[in-house]
Image: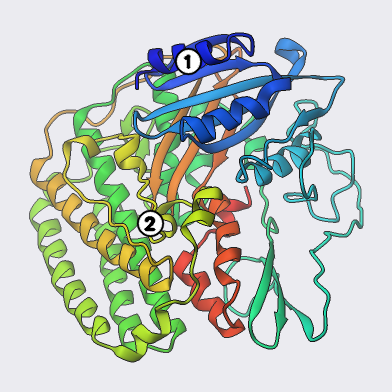
Amino acid sequence: MSLHKLNAKIEDRFPKYIYSSQALNDNELYLEADPEHIIELSMYFYEKLSCTLVCLFAADERALSGSFKLYYSFAERQSGSLIILSTSIDQNNSGFLSISKTVHTAARYEQEIHDLFGLIPIGHPELKRLVMHGNWPEGNFPLRRDFSLTHKPGASNLAYGFTEIKGTGVFEIPVGPVHAGIIEPGHFRFSVAGEPIFNLEAQLYYVHKGIEKLSEGKSTEKCFYIAERISGDETIANSLAYCQAIEKIAGINIPERAEYVRVLFAELERLTSHLGDLAGICIDVAYHFAGSQFNMLRGWAYEMATQLCGMRFLRSVNKLGGVRKEFVAGKEKSLLEQLNTMQRELEDTVDIIRHNSMFNDRIENTGVLDTKIAYDLNAVGPAARASGISNDMRKQFPYAAYPKLTFRVPVYAGGDVNSRMKVKIKEAFESISLMRQVIENMPGGKNFEPLEPLGPYKKAFGITESPRGENIHWVMTDETGNIFRYKIRTPSFCNWPALCYAVAGNIVPCFPLINKSFNLSYAGNDL
């Protein structure tokens, strides 16, 4: 359905609740809505139009309109369109109606808004701190424009408020936030009766960096470097989403060669990530041969990254308007040979592990994420596709050169570790195929298109499919064309709650295995 038809349908259904509408950037429909009817509007989008709430965030626009703004961002996946409901909250009234009882995935977004802006979601079922820990004093809201980046608030000692489950034989097992390995900090509170887990609660944000605050007032070029460093293993996915948003605002089309190069690096990042996940799953069940094989393949992928750009984390590849320089010319033959070798070795390794009955018994029916729960929480990426949900932004919101290339989106219905592993194996093969297609069909031409200065108060979304799933970035410029508001929603934000559900019913020793099958990012969540 086109934006025009969508707009007409919505305005016909709610003639009094929609104050204004504006179509931007080919696929974004902004609707200014009555805040008193936001629940009814959200229910209509979610239930009648089958739209997914992919992001919900606030912006402090008091200097522009005397109010805070809320942006409810729904994806209409069949047409590749975004419907953004915006509502105003008067600066003297901090309350807004919670939609989380109807659209369950809204709950964490509303908690985040409460922590960072001090706005209160009225009717929220469990309003407690999400981003801010107990040492953050009350009354300090860092994403308000009048909160200085250099301000250091005093100490506090507020309790987090874990869910307490009581009963005969019920025990709590606290794990973290400091772990035995080199992973980042996160606290997990298990409620168990014997070994089976019947509730898991995760407390994150120990490495909250204030990225969205750091971005305020920055030039688009300086903010690009912030985007690149959100999460080390999603450099391309994040920098590309940011570039898309800025390029939409600038109204430019990047060169075709740059579109192909972006796909090459995006798939190399996906391949490297999935190979690491597969190795971790095998090692967590003491299948060290298979783990070593996958780690060896991952090492080969890192060598390819070094050959292409000299950086295994793939930084300084993207550039506003395209890619930074010529990365591929003269390396085509070597790259194809390496991809062919990787495919053969990967096929052999997969064949071996699929005939290991003890390994298969360990991963089957472990950590099942039910399809309904995955849908309600808007689980994304391989975690969702392993639970029967076929969403993939490369298909539904196509970008770069993906519309010109052939690939399949693997989907399984089991929802367990085995299904998540199978999705990642299939996607690894698809990534190799896509990289081959890019190298063999790479067009000539330049690598980037210069950008003109951006206009004031322009806004746009950038969307990519990172190795972990759909990745949503939104940018709004200020009066000088610098960054007014930069909202980032990485896939880990959606999938951490899904992990907690998948763990329930399993025994404690299964947690590391289930956790690794999701492989969520702490840094990508703790912005």
Judged left or right of residue 390, residue 143 is right
Q: Can residue 35 be seen in this view?
A: yes
Nearest the eye: 189 or 46: 46
Q: How crowded is mark 1: few (under 14 residues within 10 Å), some or many (20 or more)?
A: some
Q: Residues within 10 Å of mark 2 (few under 14, many from 20)?
A: many
Position above or below: 31 against 525: above
Can you identify the residue that label 2 sits on? 388
Q: Which amino acid, mark 1? A: Leu
Q: Which amino acid, mark 2? A: Gly
Give coordinates of residue 433: x percent, y percent.
Answer: 16, 55
Give coordinates of residue 29: x percent, y percent.
Answer: 47, 19
- Give how far apart the Cα atoms at labels 2 and 1 are: 41 Å
Q: Which residue is drawn at 46% across and 30% down?
A: 49
- Quadrant of the frame with the N terminus: top left
Q: Can residue 210 be seen in this view?
A: no
Give coordinates of residue 515: x percent, y percent.
Answer: 52, 70
